[in-house]
Amino acid sequence: MISMGRARLARALAIGGLALASVSVGCGDVDGVDGPAANEQTDPPPIAPFDARIAFTSTREGEEHIYVASDDGSQIRRLARGSRPTWSPDGRWIAFNAPNREISELRVIGVDGSGERVVASPGGMSAWSPDGTKIVFSRGDLFSFPAFSLFVVNPDGSGLTQLLSADFEDPPGNWLNYPAWSPDGKSIAFLRANDYMFWPVYVVNADGSSPRMLKGHDGNVMEPSWSPDGTMLAVGHLSLRIGTMNADGSGLQLYPRVLSFDPDWSPDGRSLIFKGFASSVGDSVSKVGSKMRIYVLDRQTLDVRQLIPDAIDPKNPSYRDDDPTWLRSNKAPAVR
């Protein structure tokens, strides 16, 4: 059983993540009138300088920036200032959150660094539809009611539509966040967070209908991510570990390594990429641990290894690597 102190700490960490990724000074209109005009899309070259497969956030150069790397963690290259990257299905674009004064914007950039544009402002954590035609994201104001709701938008910034309001179910005052689009395109998993109750994972149809709670898990999970075949979800857990469960919420399995968060799947479903503290001794950045780094777990052998190597002579000695996500396309870069 999770101690109350650890549960409160984990909830505080997650709430902090929600706030950093999605806080804004106002929700704006939901019909897209106040959003950015549809931008003319300029496609980057179809072949990236290398076969980028992993995206992550790092503060190694001071501020948060998006980086990409090959699937073995090598060939690391900086893309843009921001956090929370998510891959387009063809591997050519990355959606991410970027700060703009008091708000967080949802932006898209080519994997080669070209074509950066604002898609929604404000905008938070996001996920692409499997066909690449839509992006679901969280949008809201931490201090308003309802708080964060789910929206969908086209990658060029047009078609902004509210998918599901945060007050769709009692008790109200919820945050809807960590959206994850199922591989078949039919469903979206998300976290319905609240500061006075357990945190269940829900699934809603892609058109916003029939939201339902996954009842098989213990209500202490967050950060859902669909397996490539759509049969399972990887989740973070308030015990400060990562785990997997069936798509209906049953069969929760937690993995042994503590101080682990934010899992995502490898293309073959065998491994999980995640962030975790290298040490349980806190520092000036976090009281929980120090040296946030990116690791990969083999689900069969339970072997864990650091995937993104330590930066050489970083500008920020106490930097963290964060928000790992794995491109699950198996296509060669020339045809992505």
Image (cartoon, helix red, strand yellow):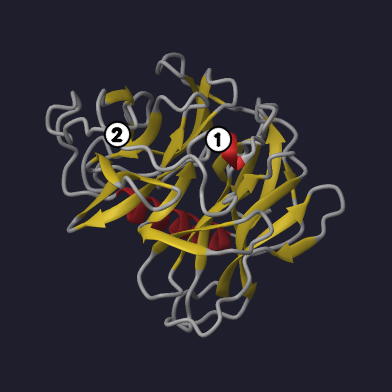
- Specify the amino acid type for callout 1: Arg
Q: Residue at x 42, y 14 (%)?
A: 209
Does residue 65 appear anywhere in the picture? Answer: yes
Q: In this view, does 176 lie to the left or right of 106?
A: right
Residue 60 higher or lower than 94, as above or below = below
Q: Which residue is drawn at 40% across and 63% down?
A: 65
Q: Is residue 178 left or right of residue 39?
A: right
- Specify the amino acid type for callout 2: Gln
Does residue 289 appear anywhere in the picture? Answer: no
Q: Position of residue 194 (x, y in %)?
A: 41, 42
How many residues crowd around disc 2 within 10 Å: few (fewer than 14), some, or many (20 or more)?
Answer: few
Residue 292 higher or lower than 299, as above or below = below
Q: Position of residue 136 (x, y in %)?
A: 39, 31
Q: In this view, does 215 lie to the left or right of 174?
A: right
Which residue reaches farthest left?
Answer: 34
Disc marking residue 41? 2
Q: Name the residue that disc number 1 marks.
A: 336
| Count of numbered tags | 2
Q: Which residue is drawn at 63% across and 71% down?
A: 309
Closer-to-camera residue (25/74): 74
The quarter holding residue 102 reads bottom left
Element marked by disc 1 = loop
Element marked by disc 2 = loop
Q: Which residue is drawn at 23% across and 43% down?
A: 122
Disc marking residue 256? none
